[in-house]
Amino acid sequence: MTGDKRASTKKAAKPKYLNGKALRAGANGRKLAEVVANEIEREIMEAGWPVGQVVGSESDLLARFQVSRSVFREAVRIVETHRVARMRRGPNGGLVVTTPDSQSLARSAALVLDFQNVTGPQLAQARMAVELVSVQQAVKQIDEAGIQRLKDTLRMEVEEKNEAEAEGAAVGVLGGIEHDLHVVISELAENPALKLFVDVLISLTSTSHGTTKFRSEVRNEEARLEVAEAVHAAHEGIVNAIIRGDAAQAQHRMRRHLEAMSAWLD
Ligand SMILES: [Zn+2]
């Protein structure tokens, strides 16, 4: 690396201070770059995620952390991978706070779970667990605005289905209608931890594992439209139970719907 000069190596050999605390590698076996990345992430969390704000320029941060350029750049790669901040080049450049998204977590989770040989039924089981709690919480938290969102989502499903039918383009219709309602319900549950796991599990069961298997199962467009009809009918039943405030019925219908979906996916 061109920036990794002798001078910066010498600099890095000096004690490393940040806000008066020494930064050391080796604690818990972590590398210095990980320690620096962790410190940057901690500061951003403590500052309450000022998205879009510059944490500092590369030279500011090099001076503060007192680490070599190569260590600093590795730390930047770590925070960029975590979607906490990214390095912006140019005159107003520097490390800019970004919005972490569940999609990056879903990708990491997919890799870890694939490495651990997770099966489709195991993912479906985990998704069932979080979605049953999600729908129960949605019943507890629902208000007029939430009811309207559920109705709008159902209406959009019908529109999407009709459009796909009219265009004879049923491929993709399920991807479009199958996920939105589940995400809306998880948002109505007003628990960011639940919503995160629903997001991750939906994306795992529908993209990395679901789609390919699903396509081999539902072969023609007519069959896809039939499944889309069944999905929409199931969604209507779930929404009606939520609106009535019937948590047990909403959970029962969610369970049956997810069981049916995983049968199609296998
Ligand atoms: Zn569904």
Image (cartoon, helix red, strand yellow):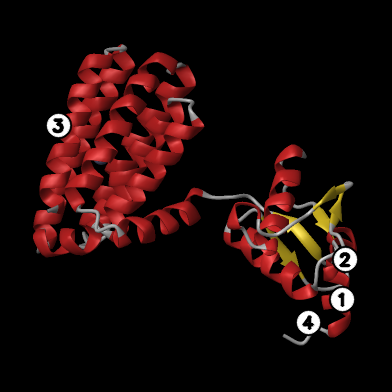
Q: Quadrant of residue 132?
A: top left
Task: Give the Cα distance between marks 4 and 1.
Answer: 11 Å
Q: Nearer the viewer, mark 4 or mark 2?
A: 2
Ligand 1 picture quarter? top left
Give the mark, 4 or 1, whose residue is nearer the N terminus.
4
Q: Residue at x 77, y 61 (%)?
A: 95
Q: Residue at x 19, y 33 (%)?
A: 234
Q: Is 249 positioned to the left or the right of 66 in the image?
A: left
Q: Nearer the viewer, residue 126 or 223?
A: 126
User: Badge 4 is on which residue?
Assistant: 4
Q: Mark 3 Cα within 10 Å, few/some/many (few <14, many 20+)?
A: few
User: Badge 2 is on which residue?
Assistant: 14
Q: Nearer the viewer, mark 4 or mark 1?
A: 1
Amino acid on which the number 1 mark rests in the picture: Lys
Amino acid on which the number 3 mark rests in the picture: Arg
For the residues bearing labels 2 and 1, Cβ distance under 8 angstroms: yes
Q: Is 60 positioned to the left or the right of 258 in the image?
A: right
Q: Mark 1 Cα within 10 Å, few/some/many (few <14, many 20+)?
A: few
Task: Give the Cα distance between marks 2 and 3.
Answer: 63 Å
Q: Nearer the viewer, residue 65 or 225?
A: 65
Q: Mark 2 Cα within 10 Å, few/some/many (few <14, many 20+)?
A: few
User: Badge 1 is on which residue?
Assistant: 10
Find residue 181 and report its horizontal and vertical position in percent. 34, 37
Q: Nearer the viewer, mark 3 or mark 4?
A: 4
For the residues bearing labels 4 and 1, Cβ distance under 8 angstroms: no
Find residue 262 and report its horizontal and vertical position in percent. 16, 45
